[in-house]
Image (tube, coloured by chain):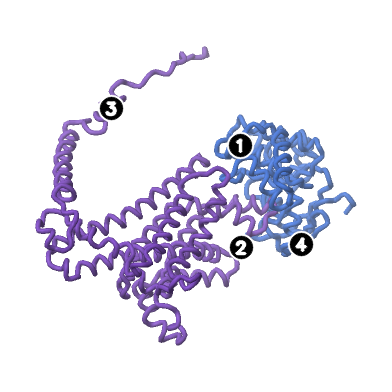
Chain colours: A blue, B purple
Amino acid sequence: MSDDTIISFDKVNKWFGDFHVLRDIDVLVAKGERIVICGPSGSGKSTLIRCINRLEAHQKGTIIVDGIELIDDLKNIDSIRSEVGMVFQSFNLFPHMTVKDNLVIGQYLVRRVPKSEAEEIAMTYLERVKISDQADKYPAQLSGGQQQRVAIARSLCMKPKIMLFDEVTSALDPEMVKEVLDVMVDLAQEGMTMLVVTHEMGFARTVADRVIFMDEGQIIEENTPDAFFDNPASERAQNFIGQVLHHL
Amino acid sequence: MEPILAPFKMPQPAPYQSKGLLGWLRINFFSSWFNSLITLVLIYIIFNLANFLIHWAFINAVWFGDSAKSCPDINAACWAFVTDRWRLFVYGLYPNELYWRVNIVYALAALTIISFLYSYGRWTKYFRITMIIIFPITAYIFLVGDAFDLKYVAPEEFGGLLLTLVIASIAILGSIPLGLILALGRTSDLKVISKVCTYFIEFWRGVPHIVIIVMFVALLPIFIPDGAGIDVVVRAFIAFAAFNSAYMAEVFRGGLQSIPIGQFEASRAIGMSYWKMMGYIILPQAIRNSIPALMNTCIMIFKETTIVMLIGFSDLLGIIQLSLESSDWIVPPHIFSSAYTFAALIYFIFTFGMSKYSRRLENRSNIEQQ
């Protein structure tokens, strides 16, 4: 494990009841690395990244994030969560607050940034995702693509070291996928450590350093995106890529 | 294949028949000969009913008088009964010379309600918080007294509308926070807390209210020897707050369950603690979603205060009944209908106000969520 490792999974196992959802997962992520995780549904890819900010707790093995081992200790969970941003498939913006307040509330409550300063930071990030003109609207008044960009800005406001993206374009109408991916590409170019669960192969080829292919709770294959998509080694990956390509 | 191009169509005005008052009447009341017939029959019935009501309640009614003899006409309302005894209805058995104290409390109550009805710019929040803190304290001081040179008035002497309002306020304002705590407890991950809250709720919800009231008032002193030291009215208040909190808890639990799991996950992913997540993200939404059911429960509580009659208190309904049995008014049964119409009207005014207010709250949250 080198010095710039920021996430390490060592023989991580997890069960949902009797269902063995993660089986002996070993992953090392270096600072600034962009990793795309793909695989058929139910393969455990979402569970894997949800273990990183402990929305799911693993039962066996060790996960170390930014030098802190994840165990059942409240303090250590909160400090990890403030380092790790997460964006969800269903946006999960707070519907009772304006867009700006969605960005302010976390800074104010968790990072204890004074309100006026938090508002400035919020506006900066809203500008970055090109949506500052919607700051005083409520989430329900925005389109899916806009909501997802607000969600990304909300995570970035917390100044995370790691960003997790859980199928963030899957719930969007096709014409809105690009605007969200553009924001993520920008972010990748700035050197953010990113773990992205997605089937967007174009995105993977543009930004990913590495693709991890999972099936039935295991990592089946790891490779550079070009090598993985052009010449998948395992039969499962070949089948999967065949199905994804067929759809496109 | 050659593309088939459809010409672009400009928007057109709606057909004439569906617009204007006549169009509206036609569509809603006279769309077919059968509907027209029903409309005419209903108009006839409504006209006759209204005619009777106006004659009964206004034209033939007796407005003033001091005994049943003033109201000889059995086909007319006898508001004399109400105007003769309104002091009793409004103040109960509160000492005559101390009515001003009750008036101050009524005025403060009105002020508190007003603070919630309108917006006062940036002072709104402070105004409301001040009123909600000051009102119960001053109300207690003025009503019960025994402080600041105010003469002590035993809660047993409350009655009429005053008692109804006091019980309803305590039951509603007491059961909302208690119910919120119970709902949070019941949905808690900690098994022990969850179980305790669940059984607490199930117990209070499962026992008839009359049983609870009687138990608290009559049997508590037997089980807890010191219980007799607690004022009987206070015991009734506690009973009301306790069993209504069980209903409130279920209302809030429904609200909590309406919040998508993603809201919890997003809050936790940002790093919020449980209480910050609940206080800023989950509860504001859950309470808003609970408003219709919450108001339903409040209205139920308000009307159910009448069961204190069973343990010998004279709330508004009780004091009206007592007055009907007084020697001046005892004979003719047609006064009953006037008296109960009056009672119904008073209860309706309050519950209708509550339901209007809840509709406003709902509309306001709908604007935000479109």
Mark 2 residue element: loop
Q: Amino acid at mark 3?
A: Leu
The answer to the question of whether label 4 and label 1 lie on touching residues, with beta carbons closer than 8 A, is: no
* For discs 4 and 1, the disc positioned in front in the rendered view: 1
**For mark 1, what is the residue?**
A136
Residue, far right: A3
Q: CA distance from mark 1 to mark 2?
A: 44 Å
Residues beneath discs 3 and 4 located on the same chain:
no
Residue sitting at 46 percent across and 70 percent down? B150
**For mark 4, what is the residue?**
A61
Q: Amino acid at mark 1?
A: Asp
Mark 4 residue element: strand
Please tell me which residue lies in front, A6 or A19.
A6
**For mark 2, what is the residue?**
A17
Residue B26, compared with residue A75, is above or below; it is above
Q: Amino acid at mark 4?
A: Gly
Mark 1 residue element: loop
Residues beneath discs 1 and 2 located on the same chain:
yes
Residues beneath discs 1 and 3 located on the same chain:
no
A2 sits to left or right of B34 = right
**For mark 3, what is the residue?**
B21
Res B268 → quadrant: bottom right
Dot 1: chain letter: A
Q: Amino acid at mark 2?
A: Gly
Question: Reading the chain from its start, which is encountered first: label 4 or label 1?
Answer: 4
* For discs 3 and 4, the disc positioned in front in the rendered view: 3
Q: Which quarter of the image is occupied by the C terminus of chain A?
A: top right
Question: Reading the chain from its start, which is encountered first: label 1 or label 2?
Answer: 2
Q: CA distance from mark 1 to mark 3?
A: 39 Å
- Residue A100: % across, % down: 65, 40
